[in-house]
Image: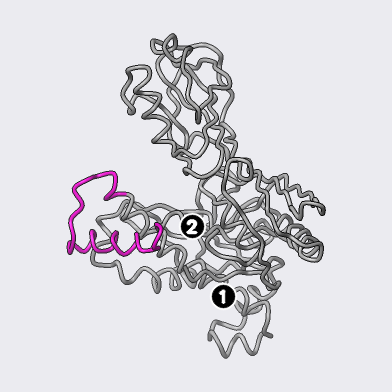
Amino acid sequence: MNRLFYLNHTQTHVHFNKGSKDFVVTEIPLYSFSGEGEHLILKIRKKDLTTWNMLQILADNCGAKVREFGYAGLKDKDGMTIQYISILKKYEEKLDNFSHPKIKILEKTYHNNKIKTGHLKGNRFFIRLKKVNPTEALMLKNVLKTIKTYGFPNYFGYQRFGRDGDNFERGKAILQGSIKERNKKMRNFFISAYQSHLFNLWLSKRVEISKLFNAFDEQELFNLFNFPKEIIKKIKAQAGFFKILPGELMHHYPYGRVFLCEDLDSESERFFQRDITPTGLLAGKKAQNATGLAGNFEKDIIKECEGFCEKMQGTRRFAWIWAEDVESEYKENEAWLELNFTLPKGSYATTFLEELTHQVNF
């Protein structure tokens, strides 16, 4: 994936092992559970299993079907994950006796509703980077301060694209009709990878544009883009790194709705204050499109899917996000840099690490 980093520090060469001792993900629920109701809520710790693997093991144990379980998000196989799932209370007795070397039920409570996909605020991460020398540790701590203050681009991580990075190509072929995928779940997965690929291309282009606006003066920018000079001036004057454009579709952050940017000066200031954030397009028939200059750059990226765009659902995704509660500790004797941080749902810790270290494909 040819993603463009927005920071300009030199690359470090640290070691990251995604084992359960060095990589821990803790899900943050969207709401507090009521403590009563027909649904059993389980707080579960799993190691080196996907969420689907875990649910299948639990289903085999209690006699339920996998689809009867509710979950807020699918977690990868790597590392240790603490997440919440729901199941009808009638299975509680069998699950009380559940035992598995890679799965542990930590707590249980009850709620009126089944947990649904997306019902989470975000995820808290613990990551241990190894083989970090003192000079690198100091630099990385300074970079962390910058990311904490100014945020970073919300690229899709490599996990979206498969071991060989070509899932999006299969998704495109399915949409074009050149190959068939009978498994509906896998079909949707490959198509989603294609949408994610287009989003990353668009976001990388917008990071490049922002770099140019930060580097050149107004006359040089006019020669490069041929935007109206007044617009050049307004974009150049924005305080943050990522420059928003006329016609941008913004989103209240971290919750709220999508709306059209009509006042570049005031909305760029709200963006700098983390009140709102720009969004990028996940192409499809239900997605709202940007207009004006922002819309032009969006169209340039998605023009390749014009013939089959109606076959995708589409939505908007945060283009820029902020890590919260960022903490770090350097253990010089072990050459470890330990990180704790929280990201909004749908974001990737590996994308955060790549911007931090400028290494790719952790």
Give the residue type that dot 2 points to: Phe
Question: Is mark 2 in CB contact (under 8 Å) with mark 1?
Answer: no
Task: Please name the residue shown 68% across and 81% down the image.
Answer: 215
Q: Where residue 124 sits: x, y (%)?
A: 63, 40
Q: Quadrant of residue 312?
A: bottom left
Q: Secondary structure at mark 2?
A: loop
Q: Is residue 278 visible?
A: no
Q: Is residue 62 among what the camera can see? A: yes
Tell me the number on the disc at residue 154: none
Q: Nearer the viewer, mark 2 or mark 1?
A: 2
Q: Which residue is mark 2?
A: 156
Where is 273 relative to 96, above or below?
below
From the top left corner, tell me how far across and down residue 119 is, in percent.
Answer: 49, 34
Q: Quadrant of the C terminus?
A: bottom right
Above or below, 307 against 333 in this view is below
| Residue 186 highlighted magenta (yes or no) | yes
Q: Secondary structure at mark 1?
A: helix
Residue at 48% x, 41% y is 75
Residue 170, position as x, y percentages in the image? 28, 61
Taking the magenta stretch, the answer to whether it contains residue 39 is: no
Identify the disc placed on residue 208.
1
Q: Quadrant of residue 285?
A: bottom left
Question: Dot 2 surroundings within 10 Å: few (below 14), some, or many (20 or more)?
Answer: many
Q: What amino acid is at disc 1?
A: Glu
Which residues are the magenta region? 162-188
| Residue 250 relative to residue 301: left or right | right
